[in-house]
Image (spheres, grey):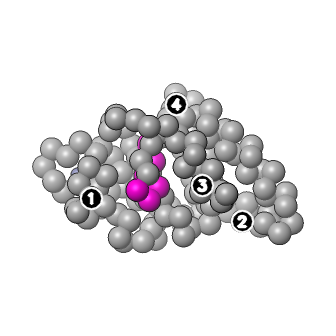
Amino acid sequence: MTSYDHLISRLEATAATDGPALIVDIEEPFACTLAIIEAWFGADDERQQLRMVVGDQVGVLTRDAAGALSAAEDVDMADPVFGGSQRSLVPGDPQYAWRRFRCPQPGCSAGDLYAILGTRAHLLRCPAHPSVTLVPA
Ligand SMILES: [Zn+2]
C-alpha cells in the first residue's frame, strides 16, 4: 500500500461541496502533499476538514485523519530506504506553492479548488464537471 493509498483510505465520503478542495497529483512526492496538508491544518485551528480530489476519488480528510496520516508517515520516513530528505521540503517552498483555480461553468458548486503548482494539467478538471478544465482564479 502506497502512502497515497493510505491517504485515499482515510478520505470520508461527502456530498458537501462547500469549502476549499485540494487537487492532488500522485506523481508528486507524497512528503510534499503531506506537507501541504499539514500546512493547511496548521494555519488555522478552526479548520476541521479539507476536501481532496485524488484521482477519481473525492472525499474529506478530517483534522484527526490528517494527524493520523502524519503520524503513520513519520514511521515510514524513519525507513532508511524511504529516506528523510524529502521531509525537509517546507510548505513555503515556491516549487510547491498552492494555486487557486475555479470552474468556468456559471454557478458551479465545486467551490474553491487548489492545486500545487506543477500539477499535471489533465488533473485540473472540475470535480462537478469532469469534462471542464479549471482556470486560474
Ligand atoms: Zn464545475
Dot 4 or dot 3, earlier in sequence:
3
Question: Dot 3 corresponds to which residue?
Answer: 5
Q: Which amino acid lies under the numbered mark 1 shown in the image of this protein?
A: Pro
Question: What residue is rendered at 78% in x and 66% in y?
Answer: 82
Neighbor class of circle 3 (other Cα within 10 Å; few <14, some 14-19, many 20+) is few
In percent of width and height, residue 70 lies at 69, 45
The residue pinned by badge 1 equals 130
In this picture, residue 22 sits left or right of residue 64: left
Of pointers 2 and 4, the one earlier in the residue sequence: 4
Q: Residue at x 78, y 56 (%)?
A: 76
Q: Residues within 10 Å of mark 1 (few under 14, many from 20)?
A: few
Instruction: Name the residue beneath numbered marker 4.
Output: 48
Q: Earlier in the sequence, mark 2 or mark 1?
A: 2
118 and 52: which one is in front? 52
Residue 59 pos. (x, y %) = 44, 43
- Main structural element of the magenta stretch: helix, strand or loop? strand
- Report the amino acid beneath label 4: Gln
